[in-house]
Image: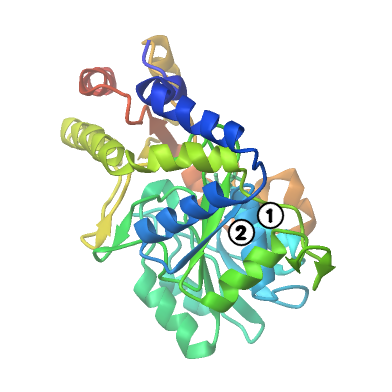
């Protein structure tokens, strides 16, 4: 059996260090925010090439609080990819702004800057690109469109820890960059965790208040914030795992190289990597017209795969109220019908990756 992902192996590799880090927090007597969270924030900001990181409870909260820090709300429009995990859309809904979905470049599956240009209106307040599957979105044209019009750029980097765009790590291209450390992400905690990175001190300061009841001084509340603080136990785990992120990314890249070389004449549509992109292979996603049949055959061969994602946000019952005809975003719909994610992770062996290639051939 080759599972899609075995998270337990990540723990076992680092067990003594993770156990010691957790024990350190338990022994410290400090269980909310504090030095462990601050240390992780400093280390994560440095890794990302950002001035500031603000730890929050999860990736969805990172997105919601980023939009709140920019005072985006009702009447405002936010441009989002049609092809993304639903969290990107839910964040816009959470601040009662209007979702403006934009179709992807079919080669990269990431939001298409030319289509963004056509979707901008006087009400557009932010563009929210997603670095899907760990492949950076084409940031320069997006930043240029935004800069010319005073529009904010908020990045959903939940799948892109360590990815680089034109040689510069994702983390501070836009105004705010939102991270998830959900266990299955490239940098994953032992539970829920998230962060926002930025090089704007004013926004970092606002986020620190928003995540903590809107408070800057104990029992003094400047605005209606939330409780969405990064847990220090998770911060301690993340600090251990961060020391391995580059090595584990290298292992993902080795697996991706085996897949891409082994499948180049297979007839499947393989991931396209533009020359300016250094992806981190959160997922290795190929396309097949007979996706469901392929998934079934791989399953029979003992190979676990997943579909990211089977139903695009606009076709979810949750968004029935938007009344977007399902046919109106045909690329998102087509990708949802054709994509298949192969086993991927730092603990998948090259031998197993070659077995996956053989099964696909
Ligand atoms: C995982 C993910 C999120 C949400 O992160 P959580 O920590 O699960 O809330 C948001 N956007 C994308 C693209 C994701 O993959």
Residue at position x 57%, y 70% from top? Answer: 204
Q: Is residue 301 positioned above or below 282 on the image? A: above
Instruction: Specify whether tag 1 is near ligand 1 (CB below 8 Å).
Output: no
- Give left or right: position of 85 versus 290: right
- Give left or right: position of 79 versus 319: left
* Foreground pick, 113 / 62: 62
Question: Which label number is shown at residue 50?
Answer: none
Instruction: Specify whether tag 2 is near ligand 1 (CB below 8 Å).
Output: yes
Q: Is residue 240 positioned above or below 125 on the image? A: above
Indicate which label's residue lies in the foreground, 1 or 2: 2
Please tell me which of labels 1 and 2 falls first in the chain: 2
Residue at position x 42%, y 33% from top? Answer: 340
Residue identified by numbered label 1? 90
What separation in Å lies between label 1 and label 2 (alpha carbons)?
A: 9 Å
Q: Is residue 264 positioned above or below 157 on the image? A: above
Q: Is residue 287 positioned above or below 128 on the image? A: above
At label 2, counting other C-alpha atoms closer than 10 Å, the crowd grade (few under 14, some 14-19, many 20 or more) is many
Kindly tell me whether residue 35 is visible in this rendering.
yes
Kindly tell me whether residue 293 is visible in this rendering.
no
The quadrant the C terminus occupies is: top left
At label 1, counting other C-alpha atoms closer than 10 Å, the crowd grade (few under 14, some 14-19, many 20 or more) is some
Residue identified by numbered label 2? 63
Whole-percent x, y for residue 261 in the image: 16, 35
Residue at position x 28%, y 21% from top? Answer: 356
* Foreground pick, 361 / 173: 173
Label 1 with label 2: CB-CB less than 8 Å: yes
The quadrant the N terminus occupies is: top left
Whole-percent x, y for residue 140 in the image: 35, 74
* Foreground pick, 204 / 107: 204
Element class at badge 2: helix
């Amino acid at each position: 059996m080759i599972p899609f992902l075995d998270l337990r192996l990540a723990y076992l590799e680092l067990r003594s260090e993770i156990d010691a880090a957790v024990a350190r927090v338990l022994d410290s007597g400090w269980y909310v925010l504090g030095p462990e969270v601050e240390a992780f924030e400093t280390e994560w900001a440095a890794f990302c090439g950002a001035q500031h990181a603000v730890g929050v409870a999860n990736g969805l909260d990172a997105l919601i609080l980023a939009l709140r820090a920019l005072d985006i709300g009702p009447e405002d429009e936010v441009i989002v990819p049609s092809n993304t995990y639903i969290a990107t859309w839910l964040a816009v809904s959470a601040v009662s702004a209007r979702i403006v979905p934009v179709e992807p470049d079919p080669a990269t599956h990431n939001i298409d800057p030319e289509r963004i240009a056509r979707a901008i209106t006087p009400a557009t307040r932010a563009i929210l690109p997603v670095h899907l599957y760990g492949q950076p979105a084409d940031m320069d044209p997006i930043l240029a469109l935004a800069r010319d019009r005073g529009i904010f750029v908020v990045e959903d980097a939940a799948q892109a820890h360590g990815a680089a765009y034109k040689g510069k790590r994702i983390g501070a291209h836009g105004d705010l960059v939102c991270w998830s450390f959900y266990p299955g992400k490239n940098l994953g905690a032992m539970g829920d965790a998230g962060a926002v990175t930025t090089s704007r001190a004013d926004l970092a300061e606002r986020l620190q208040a928003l995540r903590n009841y809107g408070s800057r001084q104990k029992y003094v509340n400047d605005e209606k914030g939330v409780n969405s603080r990064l847990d220090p136990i998770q911060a301690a785990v993340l600090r251990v795992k961060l020391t391995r992120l580059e090595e584990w990314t290298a292992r993902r890249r080795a697996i991706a190289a085996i897949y891409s070389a082994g499948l180049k004449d297979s007839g499947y549509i393989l991931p396209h990597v533009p020359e300016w992109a250094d992806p981190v292979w959160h997922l290795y996603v190929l396309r097949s017209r007979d996706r469901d049949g392929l998934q079934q055959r791989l399953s029979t061969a003992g190979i676990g795969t997943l579909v990211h994602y089977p139903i695009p946000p606009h076709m979810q019952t949750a968004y029935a109220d938007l009344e977007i005809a399902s046919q109106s975003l045909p690329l998102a719909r087509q990708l949802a019908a054709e994509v298949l994610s192969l086993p991927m992770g730092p603990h998948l062996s090259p031998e197993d990756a070659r077995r996956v290639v053989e099964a696909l051939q």
